[in-house]
Amino acid sequence: MEKINEVIIDYKGSIFKTLKREDGRFYCPICGAGENAPIFFTESDLIRHICNHDQIKKALAKKKKE
Ligand SMILES: [Zn+2]
């Protein structure tokens, strides 16, 4: 079974708690570490993905206010 560690990434002052595999790749903390979960090779790939989640959340929050 693969080992997954919880790591903290500091990206331009934004702190992300995420999951790092033993081979150095990352899982999205929102999508999780399931069999079909996306895997990211670099921190910047992961951050970009997390930002997409953030935009979705903002879009939903905006819709609720309207
Ligand atoms: Zn995700």
Image (spheres, grey):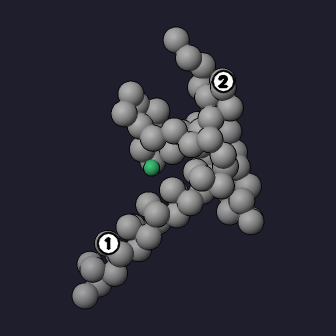
Q: Which amino acid does label 2 sit on?
A: Glu
Q: Is residue 5 visible?
A: no
Q: Residue 57, how many percent across, how many down?
A: 39, 67
User: Split into 4 quadrants, where in the image is the C terminus?
Assistant: bottom left
Q: Quadrant of residue 65?
A: bottom left
Q: In which quarter of the image is residue 23?
A: top right
As displayed, is residue 24 above or below residue 44?
above
Residue farthest top in this picture: 1
Q: Quadrant of residue 58?
A: bottom left
Q: Residue 29, how many percent across, how many down?
A: 51, 44
Distance in Å between CA atoms under marks 2 and 1: 35 Å
Q: What residue type is labelled 1?
A: Leu
Residue 60: numbered disc = 1
Q: CB of residue at label 1: within 8 Å of ligand 1?
A: no
Q: Residue 1, how many percent across, how many down?
A: 52, 11
Answer with mark 2 or mark 1, whichever residue precedes in sequence: 2
Helix or strand or loop: what does disc 2 sit on? loop
Disc 2 or disc 1, which is closer to the eye? 2
As displayed, is residue 7 above or below residue 14?
above
At label 1, counting other C-alpha atoms closer than 10 Å, the crowd grade (few under 14, some 14-19, many 20 or more) is: few
Q: Which residue is drawn at 52% across and 63% down?
A: 51
Q: Is residue 34 left or right of residue 28?
A: left
Task: Kindly identify which residue carries mark 2.
Answer: 22
At label 2, counting other C-alpha atoms closer than 10 Å, the crowd grade (few under 14, some 14-19, many 20 or more) is: few
Helix or strand or loop: what does disc 1 sit on? helix
Q: Residue at x 56, y 60 (%)?
A: 48
Q: CB of residue at label 2: within 8 Å of ligand 1?
A: no
Q: Can residue 54 be seen in this view?
A: yes
Q: Is residue 63 left or right of residue 27?
A: left
